[in-house]
Image: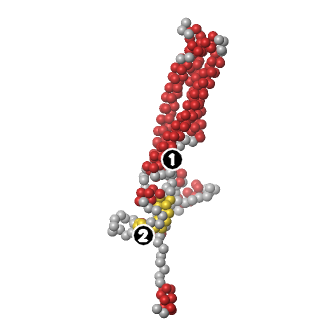
């Protein structure tokens, strides 16, 4: 072929349109065994007869820790806006969209202006939507709080009984200390310090056990729901509350148990 005709053929050749890409979440990639670069066909309808568009998996994103999406088990596919319009057949319509604001923006004024633009839609804060979609988790949180209160009351009663029984076993020791001239306050303080040390050691052991249990709970349910959401956490405020509460209950139980014995005459403690 002569050189001018070859150049003309190359010039008139239509450029190839690059294939569109999509992004999928890691749960979808693991379920469908997809990786970056794989080709897939997407369509608004299921079935072999549906018109599908061939695309390439361009990215795999990690699903966010959204409590409202945990139990739904939805897979997330992100695509270009014009591509989504063409596949869904929605045209210029949308169900919802998000607007990002600056930290210094007057959000209330922005909501008021947006809601007065047209009739048929309403703007909400993202915080309000999160609260509405997390009603189930709020009920579960209140239920756990009620269980926690009942557990604390029951454990305090159990701790008091243990301390009373423990002090009762030392009746002769306390009577001997009293007969040796040890004052009542010294006996009371020794029992209180012992109860406080036991309470702190028990709370530390409980925190370690809680951290281990929390680790296994997160490991199991994150694998089940395929989410980075933490289902159980042990935070410094929780540790501080646990240690403080244990110390207060231990000291209170020690005071009540010791005051009962120091008021009894030493010879009566010996059974005479």
- Marks 1/2: CA distance? 36 Å
- Say whether disc 1 or disc 2 marks the residue closer to the N-terminus: 2
In this picture the colour scheme is secondary structure
Identity of the residue drawn at 59% across and 33% down: 244
Image location of residue 82, percent across then percent down: 47, 69
Q: Nearer the viewer, residue 202 or 91?
A: 202
Identify the mark at residue 54; answer none if there is no mark: 2
Q: Position of residue 8 (x, y in %)?
A: 49, 89
Using the rendered view, name the quadrant where residue 263 is placed: top right
Pick the front one: 152 or 177? 177
Quadrant location of residue 89? Answer: bottom left
Residue appearing at x 59%, y 40% in the figure = 236
Q: Position of residue 194 (x, y in %)?
A: 60, 24
Q: What residue sits right under mark 1 in the picture?
A: 230
Q: Residue at x 47, y 57 (%)?
A: 26
From the top left corner, tell me how far across and down residue 28 is, in percent: 44, 58
Q: Is residue 119 visible?
A: no
């Amino acid at each position: 072929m002569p050189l001018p005709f070859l150049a003309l053929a190359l010039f008139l050749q239509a450029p190839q349109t690059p294939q569109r890409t999509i992004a999928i979440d890691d749960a979808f990639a693991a379920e469908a065994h997809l990786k970056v670069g794989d080709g897939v066909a997407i369509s608004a309808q299921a079935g072999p007869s549906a018109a599908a568009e061939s695309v390439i998996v361009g990215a795999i994103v990690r699903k966010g820790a959204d409590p409202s999406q945990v139990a739904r088990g939805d897979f997330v596919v992100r695509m270009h806006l014009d591509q989504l319009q063409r596949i869904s057949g929605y045209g210029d319509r949308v169900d919802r969209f998000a607007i990002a604001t600056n930290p210094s923006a007057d959000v209330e004024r922005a909501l008021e202006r947006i809601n007065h633009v047209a009739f048929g839609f309403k703007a909400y804060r993202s915080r309000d939507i999160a609260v509405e979609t997390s009603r189930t988790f709020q009920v579960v949180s209140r239920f756990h709080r009620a269980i926690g209160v009942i557990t604390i009351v029951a454990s305090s009663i159990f701790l008091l009984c243990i301390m009373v029984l423990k002090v009762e076993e030392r009746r002769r020791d306390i009577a001997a200390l009293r007969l040796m001239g040890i004052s009542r306050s010294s006996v009371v303080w020794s029992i209180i310090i012992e109860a406080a040390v036991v309470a702190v050691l028990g709370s530390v052991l409980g925190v370690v056990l809680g951290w281990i249990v929390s680790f296994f709970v997160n490991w199991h349910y994150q694998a089940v729901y395929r989410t980075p959401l933490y289902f159980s956490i042990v935070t410094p405020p929780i540790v501080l509350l646990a240690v403080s509460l244990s110390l207060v209950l231990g000291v209170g139980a020690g005071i009540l148990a010791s005051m009962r014995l120091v008021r009894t005459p030493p010879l009566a403690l010996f059974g005479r």
